Image (tube, rainbow, N blue to C red):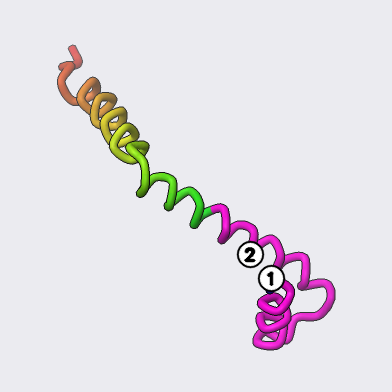
């Protein structure tokens, strides 16, 4: 199925054999990004990251300099 998708993308963009590697990297990157978003959305990881960032932001904003 992945090969069919790659062939379809190649036909759309008119990619030659040299462009096939680039298309493969783009597809793999897309799968990784979708996986990360799925992991963050389906677990408490997003909440944990948000809490950590808020804690760090609080450290910078609550301490007066001088």
Answer above or below: position of 8 versus 52.
Answer: below
Q: Is residue 27 left or right of residue 40?
A: right
- Asked which secondary structure carries label 1, the reply is helix
Q: Is residue 10 left or right of residue 44?
A: right
User: Residue 15, how many percent across, how many down?
Assistant: 75, 81
* Mark 1 Cα-neighbour bin, 10 Å: few <14, some 14–19, many ≥20: few
CA separation in Å, label 1 and label 2: 9 Å
Per the rendered image, the range of residues in magenta is 3-32
Helix, strand or loop: magenta stretch: helix
Given residues 6 and 54, the one toward you in this image is 6
Q: Residue at x 24, y 31 (%)?
A: 54
User: To which residue does mark 2 refer?
Assistant: 27
User: To which residue does mark 1 refer?
Assistant: 2
Q: Is residue 8 left or right of residue 58?
A: right
Q: Is residue 24 magenta?
A: yes
Answer above or below: position of 59 versus 35.
Answer: above
User: Residue 50, how many percent across, how many down?
Assistant: 28, 36
């Amino acid at each position: 199925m992945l090969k069919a998708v790659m062939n379809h993308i190649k036909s759309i963009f008119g990619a030659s054999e040299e462009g096939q590697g680039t298309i493969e990297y783009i597809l793999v990157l897309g799968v990784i990004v979708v996986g990360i978003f799925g992991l963050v959305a389906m677990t408490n990881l997003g909440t944990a990251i948000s809490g950590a960032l808020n804690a760090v932001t609080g450290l910078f904003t609550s301490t007066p300099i001088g």
